């Protein structure tokens, strides 16, 4: 990325990128090393060659590129046309999309039970979308048909990959990934000291498992093959 125009959404999404750059001796604050550009939440700037590199989620923006036509070939972009840097491989990936709850609210009578039931309902939903893929996609299309079916199918398949398998059971914190997130946060100056042992808890998620039927770990989960469609239609 040295000397390149590199996009980032900001809003906290830049930390994985910035720590990775510093690990390679590049200063994201020095435009002579790399030019950091505010990126919109799509891949248009990359596709229009306004950026050399752009941030993408596997379940969304990456597919937007694959669903676009490569002007050099007249065909859809292929994975081999792209250089993909996976921050899980780099070692700077951070946990995202948690369930947060205010400790004072949780301490009020009856609210732990409410939180447990909320978690159980969420876990049941992800079990359903793992086991009833087509029906889950249709529910989303019926209620929010902003994106095409092809893109929705890609999204669900990739999100399922992020959730399943869950060796400790769905919703249980992965300690190693937590520790890595803390390390990256400290290295990037997001926080000045490591959070305490009470920063997360797993007992409510474990209690929620008692409401689940079927497989809460997805040990035998296998993703499906999703056809990439032009424009995600």
Image (tube, rainbow, N blue to C red):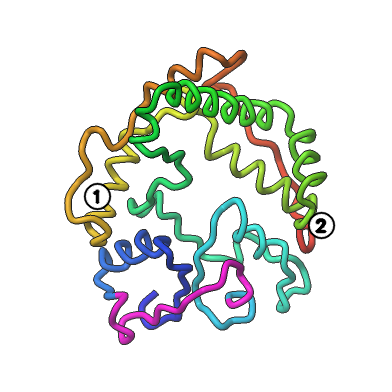
Q: What residue do we see at 73% from left, 53% from top?
A: 151
- Eyeballing the image, is 33 above or below 221? below
Tell me the tag on residue 12: none
The image quadrant that residue 111 belongs to is top left
| Viewer-nearest residue: 89 or 12 | 12
Label 1, label 2: how far apart the Cα atoms are: 40 Å
Q: Which residue is mark 1?
A: 183
Residue 122 % position (x, y): 58, 30
Relative height, residue 92 to residue 156 (above, below): below
**What residue did someone put label 2 on?**
233
Indicate whether 56 appears above or below 140: below
Mark 1 Cα within 10 Å, few/some/many (few <14, many 20+)?
some
Looking at this view, is 83 or 7 the one in front?
7
Q: Callout 2: few (<14), some (14-19), or many (20+) C-alpha neighbours within 10 Å?
A: few
Answer above or below: position of 171 versus 63: above
Is 33 part of what is drawn in magenta? yes
Quarter of the image that includes the N terminus: bottom left
Whether the residues at callouts 1 and 2 have beta carbons within 8 Å, the answer is no
Quarter of the image where one finds residue 132? top right
Confirm whether the magenta stretch covers residue 47. Answer: no
Among numbered discs 1 and 2, the one appearing first in the sequence: 1
Question: Left or right: where does residue 154 sit relative to residue 158?
Answer: right
209 on left or right of 105 = right
Which span is picked out in magenta? 28-45
Q: Residue lying furthest left in this view?
A: 193
The spot of residue 215 in percent (x, y) is 58, 17
Which residue is drawn at the image coordinates 50% and 17% (left, top)?
209
Q: Is residue 102 visible?
A: yes
In the rendered image, the quadrant that contains the C terminus is bottom right
In which quadrant of the rendered view does residue 105 lie?
top left
């Amino acid at each position: 990325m040295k000397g390149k125009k590199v996009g980032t959404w900001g809003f906290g999404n830049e930390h994985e990128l910035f720590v990775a750059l510093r690990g390679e001796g590049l200063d994201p604050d020095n435009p002579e090393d790399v030019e950091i550009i505010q990126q919109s939440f799509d891949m248009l700037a990359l596709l229009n060659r306004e950026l050399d590199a752009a941030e993408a989620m596997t379940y969304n923006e990456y597919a937007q590129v694959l669903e676009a036509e490569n002007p050099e070939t007249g065909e859809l972009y292929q994975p081999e046309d792209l250089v993909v840097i996976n921050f899980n491989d780099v070692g700077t990936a951070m946990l995202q999309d948690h369930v947060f709850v205010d400790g004072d609210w949780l301490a009020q009578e009856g609210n732990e039970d409410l939180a447990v039931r909320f978690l159980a309902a969420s876990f049941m939903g992800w079990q359903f979308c793992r086991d009833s893929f087509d029906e889950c996609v249709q529910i989303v299309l019926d209620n929010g048909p902003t994106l095409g079916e092809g893109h929705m199918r890609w999204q669900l398949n990739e999100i399922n990959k992020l959730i399943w398998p869950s060796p400790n059971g769905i919703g249980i914190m992965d300690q190693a990934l937590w520790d890595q997130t803390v390390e990256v946060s400290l290295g990037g100056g997001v926080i000045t000291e490591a959070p305490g042992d009470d920063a997360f808890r797993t007992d409510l998620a474990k209690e929620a498992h008692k409401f689940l039927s079927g497989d809460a770990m997805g040990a035998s989960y296998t993703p499906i093959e999703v056809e990439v469609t032009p424009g995600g239609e």
